[in-house]
């Protein structure tokens, strides 16, 4: 019986999930199509029917991660334009439930700073978008100046650095770093003390 479009879509999703796990374990350069194919129960040729190159599979992994994040945020936002900071905190909390995805993302971000990495432009564009979204969230919460005097644009870079830095610390020491609580502590630093 021929496979339906739905079957192919499910198979592709399974391959992307497996590739995410392999990348998390081995990094992009150490993750081979053969390793992904073996783990998902396909030949390398069978895998290449769905993803003809390693770069195509990488793009699918990155797109899936962004779609998972956006789906999570969309549920929380329910029609709002800017992401309120509490939604950003909920996204950090959600990420704490999926260490494999966070690990794959962290490994790929680190790998992408190397010369000629195929995900470099993806991460440059992604960080530009995330900084812009962070600035919008900070502007919604504080106006054109944060309590310490920074503009939302300058503070957004620090907001993203805190999120990514917490992910690394949490991955290295999950028993001693409570990523969601630490991020909420960071947000508390932005709030001026009550008079």
Image (cartoon, rainbow, N blue to C red):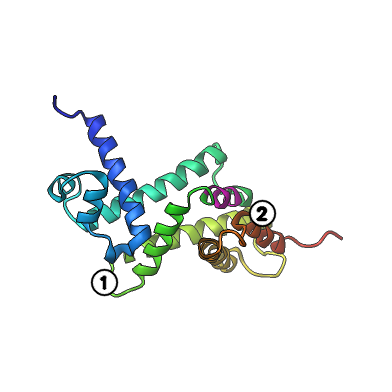
Q: Main secondary structure of the magenta part?
A: helix
**Of discs 2 and 1, which sits in the foreground?**
1
Q: Quadrant of residue 151?
A: bottom right
Image quarter in which the N terminus is found:
top left
The residue sitting at 39% across, 58% down in the picture is 104
Which residue is denoted by mark 1 in the rendering? 116
Which residue is denoted by mark 2 in the rendering? 141
Q: Is residue 136 magenta?
A: no
Q: How many marks?
A: 2
Cα separation, mark 2 vs mark 1, equals 39 Å
Q: Looking at this view, is 186 or 21 the one in front?
A: 21
Q: Is 18 situated above or below 146?
A: above
**Other residues around mark 1 within 10 Å, as few (<14) / some (14–19) / many (≥20):** few
Image quarter in which the C terminus is found:
bottom right
155 sits to left or right of 23: right
> Which SS class for mark 2?
helix
104 sits to left or right of 187: left
């Amino acid at each position: 019986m021929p496979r339906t479009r739905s079957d192919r879509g499910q198979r592709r999703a399974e391959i992307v999930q497996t590739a995410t796990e392999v990348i998390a374990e081995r990094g992009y350069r150490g993750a081979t199509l053969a390793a992904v194919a073996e783990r998902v129960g396909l030949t390398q040729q069978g895998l290449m029917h769905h993803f003809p190159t390693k770069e195509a599979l990488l793009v699918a992994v990155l797109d899936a991660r962004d779609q998972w994040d956006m789906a999570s945020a969309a549920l929380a936002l329910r029609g709002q334009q800017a992401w309120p900071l509490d939604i950003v905190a909920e996204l950090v909390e959600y990420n704490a439930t999926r260490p494999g995805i966070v690990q794959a993302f962290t490994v790929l971000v680190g790998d992408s700073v190397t010369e000629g990495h195929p995900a470099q432009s993806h991460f440059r564009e992604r960080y530009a978008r995330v900084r812009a979204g962070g600035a919008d969230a900070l502007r919604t919460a504080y106006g054109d100046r944060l309590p310490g005097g920074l503009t939302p644009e300058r503070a957004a870079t620090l907001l993203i650095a805190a999120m990514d830095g917490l992910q690394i610390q949490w991955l290295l020491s999950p028993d001693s770093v409570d990523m969601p609580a630490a991020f909420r502590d960071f947000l508390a630093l932005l709030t001026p003390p009550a008079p």
